[in-house]
Amino acid sequence: MGEEEAATLEGQFYEFSRMLDNKRDGTTITLYRSDFWMRQAKLMEDRKLTMTDTGVLFYKFSKSELNWDEWMEFLSELCALKDMDEEKVQEALTNCGLPGQTPVQVPQYRDFFLTYKPKEKLPF
C-alpha cells in the first residue's frame, strides 16, 4: 500500500477549480467553486460568512475567475473583513477533502431558520 500524499492548500485549489469540469486546467477558480469549497470546509454557514460577502470581495477583482495569487489575496481580505483567523481558515480549506467527498448543501432561504445558531456559538 502506498502512503497517501498530504493535502496542500494549492492542491485543493487545483482540485476545486476543476470541479464538475475536468477539461479545465486548474489555474483559475470561479466564485461558485470557491463558495462550494468554503461550504465543504464548513466555513460558509450563512450566518458569519455569506455568499454575499464572498461575491462582493470576489468581484472587486473585476474578473469571473481568479488565479492562485489573486485568490490568496481574496482569502486574506475575506478573513480580515469577517475577523476570522486566516491560519485556521486555510487549515479547514486544506483538510476538507476532495470536491464531493462530503455532501454539501446550499441552503435555501427558509432553511436558514432551521439551522439558526447565535453568533456567539459559531466556530470561527
Image (tube, helix red, strand yellow):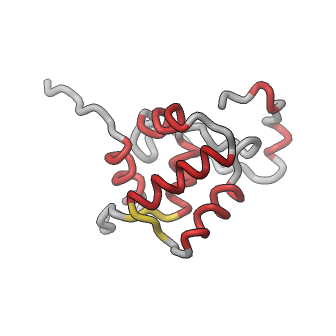
Q: In screen coordinates, is 76 left or right of 4?
A: right
Residue under the point 83% across and 30% down:
118
Q: How many labels were placed on the picture?
A: 0
Reply above or below: 52 against 97: below
Q: Residue at x 81, y 53 (%)?
A: 109
Q: In the image, is 40 to the left or to the right of 17?
A: right
- Closer to us: 120 or 51: 120
Task: Name the image quarter holding the N terminus.
Answer: top left
Which residue occupies the foreground of this view, 80 or 55? 80
Quadrant holding the C terminus: top right
Query: Residue 97 occupies which quadrant of the picture?
Result: top left
Image point (55%, 46%), residue name: 38
Q: Is residue 5 left or right of residue 88?
A: left
- Residue 104: where, in percent of width, then height? 57, 44
Q: Position of residue 13 (x, y in %)?
A: 39, 51
Q: Is residue 101 above or below residue 54?
A: above
The percent coordinates of residue 22 (x first, y second) are 32, 63
Image quarter of residue 44: top right
Please tell me which residue is depicted at 18% across the width and 26% down the height of the picture. Answer: 3
